[in-house]
Image (cartoon, rainbow, N blue to C red):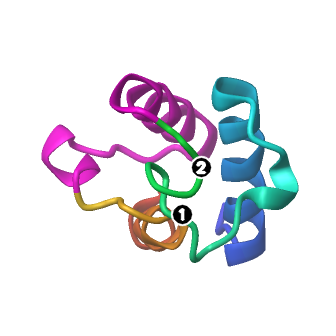
Amino acid sequence: MAHTQDDVLSGLADIVNEIAGIPTEDVALDKSFTDDLDVDSLSMVEVVVAAEERFDVKIPDDEVKNLKTVGDAVDYILKNAA
């Protein structure tokens, strides 16, 4: 199933809310996971695992460091989702 940018953003917002307690309305494409959303490295691993399951995508460990903003993660998922 093809995902839209809004689908992925909404899904990531839910995941970040569940893991880090950040309100979903605060999760936007231009937000940095670490600087704006206070997602630490351990929580980021949880976000990645949850995103992989939700969007049927594999995010290799060496790619995770490139996902600095929510927009980076959305773009990666849109390009790589099954």
* Residue at left offset 71%, top offset 59%: 27
Relative vertical location of residue 57 with respect to residue 41 in this rendering, above or below:
below
- Report the side of 7 relative to 62 (left or right): right
Q: Which residue is mark 2?
A: 37
- 54 in magenta: yes
Question: Whole-percent x and y of residue 34?
Answer: 44, 49
Q: Quadrant of residue 44?
A: top left
Q: Nearer the viewer, residue 72 or 32?
A: 32
The answer to whether mark 1 and mark 2 are in CB contact below 8 A is yes
* Residue at left offset 34%, top offset 31%: 41
Q: Main secondary structure of the magenta part?
A: helix
Q: Real-space Cα distance between discs 1 and 2?
A: 10 Å
Q: Earlier in the sequence, mark 1 or mark 2?
A: 2
How many marks on residues? 2
* Residue at left offset 36%, top offset 61%: 68
- Callout in the foreground (1, 2): 2
Of the residues shown, which amino acid type is indicated by label 1? Val
Relative vertical location of residue 33 with respect to residue 14 in this rendering, above or below:
below
The segment highlighted magenta reads 40-65
Q: Which residue is mark 1?
A: 70
